[in-house]
Amino acid sequence: MPLLSVNGTELYFEDTKDGGVPLLFSHGLLWSLRMYDAQVAHLRGRYRCVAYDHRGQGRSRDDGSSYDMEKLSDDAAQLIERLGMAPCFFVGLSMGGFVGLRLAARRPELLRGLVLIESAADAEPHGLKYRAMELITRRLGFSVLLAPIMKIMFGRSFLRDPARAAERRAMEESILALDPARTKRALEAVVTRRGVEDLLPSIRVPTLVLHGAEDAAIVEARARRSATLIPGALWVDLPRAGHTATVEEPAAVNAALDAFLSSVMDRAAPPP
């Protein structure tokens, strides 16, 4: 199992090693690098695709200590450096986007471009609600709140489509398999993060913002407010996606990534 010692922990990662310019994929709360399987399959060969699990999540190590968004950002920076990926494209969904924003503002030399999916730069407005849900799941298990969690993580189009029942079940099984103690520490990193809107005007790397129209966890107004503060940021709507667009609408995400990556690479290419 590929584990890399980074910033006092060991991070699980998968590296296609093929292709040229590197992309780093950073997942959202409750999930793992598996949420990017469709994007890696689509882009590998043309780009070097690396996806990783945050500390304490997925198959990365968890030593039982608490951590915050700043530590997660340091983890990502050191991972990029240790794997020789700089400058890379950084793709972050929700929690992964919180990491990406901090890297773009504070370590711009590590990034070639930034993609934010269902993410925002503000502090968490639903901290009390999420802590209450975490307390219930820690005492009674995730099955008690499985339906509400699915409604937070996915939009109505995905949840109501009878053809996608098997995919929904796979997502439900992932949630039911979560370790409550590990989830609590990851949740705390999300709900205690400070807002970084003040950093956004300093971001100079090309930025793409993808947002699901059915996202109930980070509503469009929050994501748009962040996008308007990033100079030159591009906005793309994902009409049938909720908070996990890479799984719900993989073809739409892949098409937007293709267009953005190509445009940035074309601008960077030397004239003939």
Image: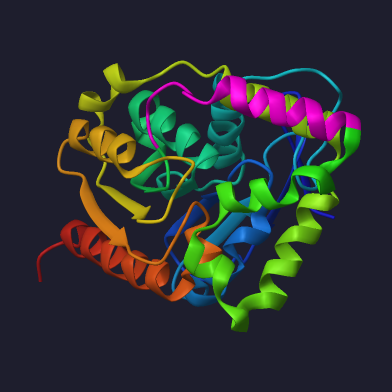
Reply above or below: 212 against 232. Answer: below
Reply above or below: 144 against 25. Answer: above
Residue 228 position by quadrant: top left
Query: Can residue 201 be seen in this snapshot?
Result: yes
Q: In terms of secondary structure, what is the magenta stretch mainly?
A: helix
Residue 223, given in percent of the width and then of the height, sits at 32, 39
Instruction: Tell me how the rendering is colored.
Output: rainbow
The residue located at (69%, 19%) in the rendering is: 67
Q: Is residue 72 left or right of residue 110?
A: right
Closer to us: 53 or 221: 221
The residue located at (39%, 33%) in the rendering is: 101
Reply above or below: 239 against 102. Answer: below
* Residue at the outermost bottom position: 163
* Residue at the outermost left position: 271
Closer to us: 161 or 9: 161
Query: Can residue 71 be seen in this snapshot?
Result: no
Residue 25, given in percent of the width and then of the height, sits at 53, 52
Residue 82, given in percent of the width and then of the height, sits at 61, 39
Residue 195 position by quadrant: top left
Q: Is residue 126 magenta?
A: yes
Quadrant of the drawing holding the C terminus: bottom left
The residue located at (26%, 58%) in the rendering is: 236
Q: Which portion, as a residue range, is magenta? A: 120-139
Closer to us: 82 or 32: 32
Quadrant of the drawing holding the N terminus: bottom right
Q: Is residue 228 left or right of residue 210?
A: left
Q: Is residue 128 magenta?
A: yes
